[in-house]
Amino acid sequence: MIILAATPIGNLGDASPRLVEAITTLPYIAAEDTRTLLNLVHALGVRHEARLFSLHEHNEAERLTQLVELAKTADVLVVSDAGMPTVSDPGFLLVRAAVEAGVEVTVIPGPSAVLSALAVSGLPTDRFTFEGFLPRKSGDRRKTFTALAEEQRTMVFFESPHRIKEALEDASAIFGAERQATVSRELTKKFEHTERATLAELVEWAKTDPKGEMVIVVAGAEVREVSIESLVEEVLADKTNGLKQAVALIAERHGVSKSALYQAALEARALR
């Protein structure tokens, strides 16, 4: 089978006994970076006898057949550099290929930067969306944020410390300066810190040049009461789509009746 195993995101004490057992006993290990894996093995003070394979974003497609074939007759451990494989890390394509080949896939759960940052944020956790790493360029970041402008779930993003201030500025411009958010850095490590504030205040905090791996958590948009009448102007102002398509898109976006919105738009258009 394929065994996906979470590795520590900072604190070695978070390495589970199951992870240690798998590293020391399984015959094959696919790692995002074999050097990082060997460093972990050394830090844990254990030994391994496994044959190692690299499995990263540049070679995953080429490794699939080889690893799936091995997993048909033996257990293959899959680890990323930190946290859970497949979550903004290699492994998704391998899992899909294994499932298609009838190979069992299981998990050794453990540390997750996504869930850790969400848990300590103080923002709603009952519904959330993980959006992965933000684009490097400001224009692309703003497009990402714009697409999420009406998202009501709490949102989680990964970002580099070198771009954290610019990313928060873009988020503030799109979501609004007063939107509540947090930035967690160095999770589980000695200098772990979570800054909780509005996006505008976080921009000021980011000017202090904070270091470490960053996870941004942003509160979702507030639920707004939307009436059919208030959406008619939006429908009639849509010059790109026909009336029916504009109604369908806007009704779905705001969760209102398509037929009621269409009728109201027809009546309003007839009066003009």
Image (cartoon, helix red, strand yellow):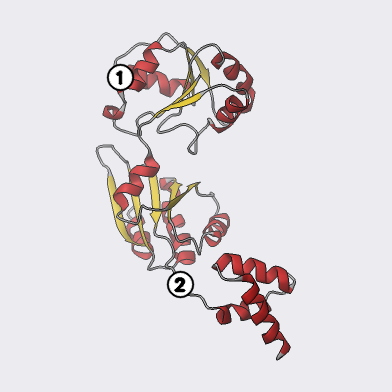
- Could you say where residue 88 lies in the image, as x and y percent from the top left? 49, 39
User: In the picture shown, does residue 140 fall above or below 115?
Assistant: below
Marking on residue 114: none
Query: Toward the viewer: 235 or 198?
Result: 235
- Could you say where residue 114 lies in the image, as x and y percent from the top left? 40, 43
Name the residue carrying label 1.
44
- What residue is at 68 percent from the left and 74 percent from the top? 238
The answer to whether the residue labelled 1 contacts the one labelled 2, judged by CB atoms less than 8 Å apart, is no
Mark 2: which secondary structure?
loop
- Side of 221 where 205 appears, left or right: left
Rate crowding at label 1 as few (under 14), some (14 to 19) or many (20 or more) other CA atoms within 10 Å. Answer: few
Q: Quadrant of residue 229?
A: bottom right
Rate crowding at label 2 as few (under 14), some (14 to 19) or many (20 or more) other CA atoms within 10 Å. Answer: few
The answer to whether one can see residue 210 in this image is no
- What residue is at 73 percent from the left and 88 percent from the top? 270
- Could you say where residue 242 lies in the image, as x and y percent from the top left? 75, 72
User: In the picture shown, does residue 133 fall above or below 4?
Assistant: below
Q: Quadrant of residue 264?
A: bottom right
- Could you say where residue 221 lies in the image, as x and y percent from the top left? 44, 65
Query: Toward the viewer: 250 or 93?
Result: 250
Q: Quadrant of the C terminus?
A: bottom right
Name the residue carrying label 2.
224
